[in-house]
């Protein structure tokens, strides 16, 4: 169940729409323009997104945002409450919907309800900067199971509960609060690895021609794929590429950097700023290093079809994934899944991506340290085949087995088998 992406003044007067796609029935509802401004652009993407990515400097809180957030969650709860049967399991996703579980409980919903946070959960000192931080946190205690991407996020949740709310953590990782037991765990998300791998093996003619051209010119490709979001560290990454060309001029004309960065949330000011910065930087680096027959950076501010992306990953020697902070980062896993095991590319990964907790065989970088990124890029470009294969096979094994299906099974099985003891009875 979710928002259908439209805004209408009379959204609440309309009946939610049911559609059937295969064996899935979806229920969607419209939002009002005020909901869009206060809930989606406002509280979700101008307060929670920057704050949960440790960017207090970008938080823009206006009165009305929190109320809009509450209102839309109430609306969603009304729609769901009208649809669920008593034996349904409810799985709520992400920061837009933190209070949804509490709203459902208020409507008498006794179903098993799980919540998964796709983005980081910040340390207590940062979370307390959120207007209504205590309310947000307490809302999370209405779920039976709360899932995070990493152990770091889970640890931050535990700290907030113990230090700021005074709830005591049990030996099994659960909390007892009022008459409820809340379980929390780390459930690192995966990708549909098999499908992505298969896609990468079938490049279109365009991608094949581009790859052959590069092979003839003995050029390697570095690839980055990210929504154009300030959390992804794109300007720092471009600077690191420029620094690589400065420190290691042997790569001049021998490497190109392809950055795909489709637009996103362009109604939020911080996103327009990052776009301008990136266009300036790519222009400056190209102006400084390019030659009549070589453009160092190819920057695409558009969405590229998924099968083309997969083939482009496979055709690249280096996957450059350097967010300043990221819940997981699926692109890191997609890059690994797309590679040819006989001649694999190297993943250069930020230590602040959730994926770094599992993907130890990548070259791990500090995205705030331009020289470190430039040197690791160099190391990746000159890495011998045997070392590339060794690193890749360990990463590939994990990406293929701990995929999206395993993640879904793991979370739902955990939710399904929890013993929901009432604290008073325990
Ligand atoms: C959030 C969390 C967490 C990107 N450009 C194009 C395109 N993409 C696809 C990628 C990838 C997805 O979008 C992006 O996923 P990420 O995980 O990298 O990042 P977020 O969008 O920020 O996702 C993140 C994730 O939720 C899951 O829990 O990992 O930490 O922030 O699949 O390939 N896809 C197509 N064209 C593009 O131009 N087709």
Image: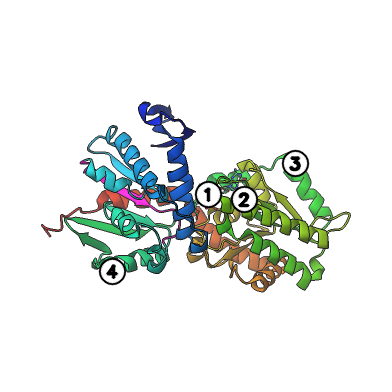
- Cβ atoms under marks 2 and 1 closer than 8 Å: no
List the residue tagged with mark 2: 272
Please tell me whether residue 74 is drawn above or below residue 30 in the rendered image: below
Dot in front, 2 or 1: 2
Dot in front, 4 or 3: 4
Q: Is residue 45 magenta?
A: no
Crowdedness of circle 3 by 10 Å Cα count: few (<14), some, many (20+)?
Answer: few
- In the rendered structure, which segment of residues is drawn in magenta? 108-121
Please tell me whether residue 169 is drawn above or below residue 36 in the rendered image: below
Q: CA distance from mark 4 to mark 3?
A: 56 Å
Crowdedness of circle 2 by 10 Å Cα count: few (<14), some, many (20+)?
Answer: some
Residue placed most toward the observer, 218 or 51: 51
Instruction: Where is residue 425? Give x, y as percent.
Output: 10, 57
- Label placed on residue 206: 3
Instruction: Where is residue 5? Give x, y as percent.
Output: 48, 35
- First in sequence: mark 3 or mark 1? 1
Q: CA distance from mark 3 to mark 1?
A: 24 Å
The residue drawn where x is 25% and y is 57% is 182
**Image quarter of the N terminus:** top left
List the residue tagged with mark 1: 193
In the image, is the residue at mark 2 within 8 Å of ligand 1 by its beta carbon? no
Q: Secondary structure at mark 1?
A: helix
The answer to whether any part of residue 59 appears in the image is: yes
Q: Quadrant of residue 198?
A: top right
Instruction: Where is residue 349? Give x, y as percent.
Output: 58, 64
Crowdedness of circle 1 by 10 Å Cα count: few (<14), some, many (20+)?
Answer: many
- Label placed on residue 330: none
List the residue tagged with mark 4: 162
- First in sequence: mark 2 or mark 3? 3
């Amino acid at each position: 169940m979710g928002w259908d992406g439209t805004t209408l003044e009379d959204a609440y007067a309309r009946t939610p729409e049911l559609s059937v796609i295969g064996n899935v029935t979806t229920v969607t509802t419209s939002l009002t323009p005020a909901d869009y401004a206060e809930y989606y652009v406002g509280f979700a993407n101008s307060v929670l997104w920057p704050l949960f990515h440790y960017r207090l400097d970008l938080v823009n809180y206006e009165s009305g945002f929190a109320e809009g957030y509450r209102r839309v969650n109430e609306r969603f709860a009304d729609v769901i409450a009208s649809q669920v049967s008593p034996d349904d399991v409810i799985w709520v996703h992400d920061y837009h919907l933190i209070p949804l579980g509490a709203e459902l409980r208020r409507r008498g919903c006794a179903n098993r309800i799980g919540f998964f946070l796709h983005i980081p959960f910040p340390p207590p000192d940062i979370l307390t900067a959120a207007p209504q931080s205590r309310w947000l946190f307490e809302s999370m205690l209405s779920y039976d199971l709360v899932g995070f991407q990493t152990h770091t996020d889970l640890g931050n949740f535990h700290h907030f509960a113990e230090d700021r709310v005074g709830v005591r953590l049990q030996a099994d990782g659960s909390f007892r609060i009022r008459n409820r037991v809340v379980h929390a765990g780390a459930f690192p998300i995966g990708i549909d690895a098999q499908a992505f791998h298969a896609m990468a093996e079938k490049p279109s003619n365009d991608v094949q021609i581009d790859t052959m051209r590069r092979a003839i010119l003995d050029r390697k490709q570095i690839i980055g794929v990210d929504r154009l979001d300030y959390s992804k560290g794109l300007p720092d990454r471009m600077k690191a590429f420029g620094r690589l060309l400065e420190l290691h001029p042997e790569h001049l004309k021998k490497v190109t950097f392809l950055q795909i960065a489709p637009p996103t949330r362009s109604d939020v000011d911080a996103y327009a700023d990052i776009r301008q910065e990136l266009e300036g930087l790519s222009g400056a680096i190209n102006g400084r290093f390019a030659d009549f027959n070589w453009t160092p950076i190819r920057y695409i501010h558009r969405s590229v079809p998924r099968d083309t992306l997969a083939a482009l990953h496979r055709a690249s020697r280096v996957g450059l994934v350097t967010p300043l902070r990221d819940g997981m980062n699926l692109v890191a896993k997609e890059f690994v899944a797309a590679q040819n095991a006989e001649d694999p590319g190297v993943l250069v990964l930020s230590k602040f991506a959730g994926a770094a907790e599992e993907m130890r065989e990548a070259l791990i970088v500090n995205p705030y340290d331009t020289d470190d990124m430039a040197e690791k890029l160099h190391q990746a470009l000159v890495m011998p085949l045997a070392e590339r294969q060794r690193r890749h096979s360990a990463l590939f094994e994990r990406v293929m087995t701990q995929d999206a299906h395993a993640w879904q099974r793991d979370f739902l099985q955990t939710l399904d088998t929890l013993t929901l003891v009432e604290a008073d009875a325990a």
